[in-house]
Each structure stands twice: as structure tokens, then as C-alpha cells.
Image (cartoon, rainbow, N blue to C red):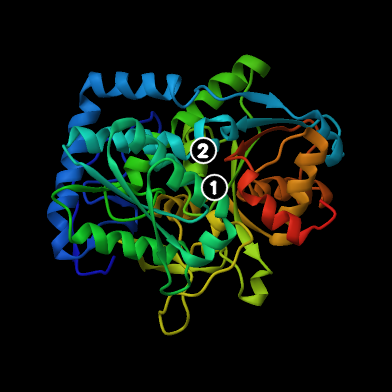
Amino acid sequence: MSSRVETGRSTSTYREPAAELPDAAGRFGAYGGRYAPEALMAALTELAEAYRLARADPAFGIELETLLRERAGRPTRLHRVPGFERLLGVPGVRVYVKREDMAHTGAYKINNALGQGLLAARMGKTRVIAETGAGQHGVAVASVCAMLGLDCVVYMGAHDMARQEANVAHMRVLGAEVRRVDAGGRKVKAAVSEAVRDWVSSTGSSFLLFGTVTGPAPYPAMVRDFQTVIGRESRRQLLAATGRLPDRVVACVGGGSNALGLFHAFLDEPDVALIGVEAAGRGIESGQHAAAITAGIPGELDGTFSYLLQDADGQVSRTHSIAAGLDYPAVGPEHGYLRDRGRVRYHAVTDATALRGFQAFARGEGIVPALESAHAIGHLLESAERGELPADSLVLLGLSGRGDKDLGIVAVTLPEA
């Protein structure tokens, strides 16, 4: 979304800690805001107000909680992974994994899709527009639209459609129209641009169901709020299992909704280290990566101001990651705020390390993780090897989704798999 007009409305939040953010302009410190064409400002204002009213309505919360339980299968499981602990080789380390791969449609994306889908129906919209990279957001949106009787159009880059054929078929089976995007890098950034163009011309009947914690206000806060169920459940489950909070919480970061959903329940716990893991692709030095916080600088993209990969002329850089869901040149504005505060530490791991993480879970635990999640797994392997994972640590690891969608990529990259 281009930077023509910036304004904001106050949005309340869906979780306990750090409730003062975003501010009335939709900002998280220096980041966030609402950068959008004039043609979208009325629609964004309408959305912010509808969300504010929905959150204040107990009936909305009850309906969402019911659907999360009955349709999404919440709460998802939390359990130890002793086979992986042995691979780490660190005395006394305990790793508990939050199994968002066990949610309906195979990933955490269903949490936000249900929340925004209900909001779209509440607003009287009959058509939902979505963008997707790895396809999991598109599948979740298509599933929710089928359930609620809403028309569904999903934009997906041609490159991502080729590497995520199973999810493309899944969306179509659910009744969604999947529109191929050949512009730009033919990945999720291009899909976002096309989805926004569609919305500009159809705001009266259509709802843009954005999939991550970026975009103009109120999207960064709203998507985060719908995902904080992950962290709230994890905190309760880990306390019940161990009687204590974790020493560190680790999650992959693309746009960043999975990580924020997990981190928010621990933001006000200074003794809990929060670690976000980005995609280093073929290596930061190669320039073929998607590590917006690790290697980017602040800038405006898709309606918000945050860390962004761009060249010396301010042009958005092409990205690369083996994981389609991490292959995006920016990160949500709240991540920028948390990075600058030092509250979350961000690291980047390569495709090769992510594949090691994939194999470690598949062969050590019988769990096939999404390649996005495999970045967080790989980071733990590297941390143990470098001696950076202390003995007797209690680790909470976010598993954002299942890896069925990635088996074709893995089969080509690791033929012995």
C-alpha cells in the first residue's frame, strides 16, 4: 500500500500484557501507522470501528471461542520432545512444543481466519479477499468462508503456486477462487499488492482478510490479538506441566503473527527470553534471504512502517527462503518495536539449517514440521552446538504448522528423505 495518507484510530487489544500499544495512531513506538491510498481510508476506518465494537460485545467473543474449540480444535497440544532433547545433547534441557500443526487446516492461521471471518460476516460483507504465500493462510480463509457462506478469492504468486501445489488444490476444493499473480517476484509481496488492488475497487461488498501482523492499522494489532490464544494456552499448559515459566520461547518469524501470538503471554516476564528466527536463505552475505530485522532498515511497505529489506535507492529487495511463508521482505511493526527495545532477540538461519531442523523432528520425533517452523528448530540445534543453550533450560518451541505442504520441496532438496 503506497504512502499517501497516514492516520489512525485507537484499537483495543485482545491480551493482557503491554495493553498500551498500539497508540491512537496505530503505532508501536516509531513503527506502524496507516499508510494507504485515500480510496481505502474510509474502509480502514470502518474496519477499525467494527473491530472495536466486536471486541466490546461478549457475544462475539463467545462465538469465536466456541468456533476455536469446536472447529479449530483448540486448545492445541503442548508436550515434551525427548527425542529432540537427546539430539541437542545439553544436560537437563527440556523442550516443550506447542502443536499448532494439529489445528484444523494444519496451522495457526485458522485462529486469525476465524476471527476476521466472523468480523466480515458481522459487517455484512459477502466476499472475502486474501493473500497467501505458503498457502496455509489461504486454506484457512477458504475453510472459514465455506463455513460462513462467503465468497472467497485468494491471490497467490506464481512462484508460490508452483511450490505449494497441494495447498492450491486444497483451496479450490474448498470453493475458493485462486488467482495467479505473475507480477514482481511472483511471491507473497506481489500477492498482497494484487489483493489490495481488488479491495480498492470493491470495499462496499468485500473484506480484506489479511494474514499477518503487518499492513495499515488496525491489521497489525487485530491479527496479533486473534493469535494471542497460542501464548495464553501455552502459558497455562506449561505451568500445569512444569510448575514454572520457560527460560526461553522460540518461534519463526516471517511477517510475524505466529511469533507475536506466542510471545505476548510472556512479554511482561523479564526472565523469559524471547527469540524470533528469520530466514537467512542462502546466507545473509549472499543477499538471497528474507531476514528483514537482521539485515533490513526501517521503511514503509504494504501500509505500515517497519523493518524492510531495501537497496540503496530505497527499492524493495527480492527475497529468498526455502519456506514460502517466510519469503517476505518486511516484518510486522510490533516486531520492530520489540527489537529496538531489546525485548525480543532475532536470529536468522539458512535453508540448510532449516532442513536439518526438519529432519531432526521428522526422524527424532515422528513429527513433520512446516519448513517455516523448521527454522526455529534449526536455531535450537545451532544454539546447542555453539554452547549457547544452558544446561537444565526449559524451552518453549512454537510449531506453526505441519509440513505436508513442503514434502515436494524436501524430496527435491534432500533426495534421501
Foreground of the two, 87 or 8: 87
Tell me: residue 87, above or below residue 180.
above
Q: Earlier in the sequence, mark 1 or mark 2?
A: 2
Query: Residue shown at 61%/59% (left/top)?
Result: 279
Residue 241 placement (x, y as % from top left): 66, 16
Secondary element under disc 2, as helix, strand or loop, is helix
Foreground of the two, 68 or 245: 68
Q: Quadrant of the N terminus?
A: bottom left
Tell me: residue 296, above or below residue 111.
below
Find residue 319 and report its image quarter. Answer: bottom right
Query: Residue shown at 21%/26% (left/top)?
Result: 56
Q: Residues within 10 Å of mark 2 (few under 14, many from 20)?
A: many
- Find disc 1 in the rendering and name its residue: 344
- Give the residue type at disc 1: Val
In the picture, the disc for residue 263 is 2
Query: Residue shown at 73%/50% (left/top)?
Result: 378
Find residue 416 and report its image quarter. Answer: bottom right
- Give the residue type at disc 2: Phe
Q: Residues within 10 Å of mark 1 (few under 14, many from 20)?
A: many
Foreground of the two, 177 or 289: 177
Q: Contact, CB < 8 Å: mark 1 with mark 2?
A: yes
Residue 212 placement (x, y as % from top left): 41, 49
Foreground of the two, 65 or 35: 65
Secondary element under disc 1, as helix, strand or loop, is strand
Describe residue 413's horizontal placement relative to residue 29 as left or right: right
In the picture, the disc for residue 233 is none
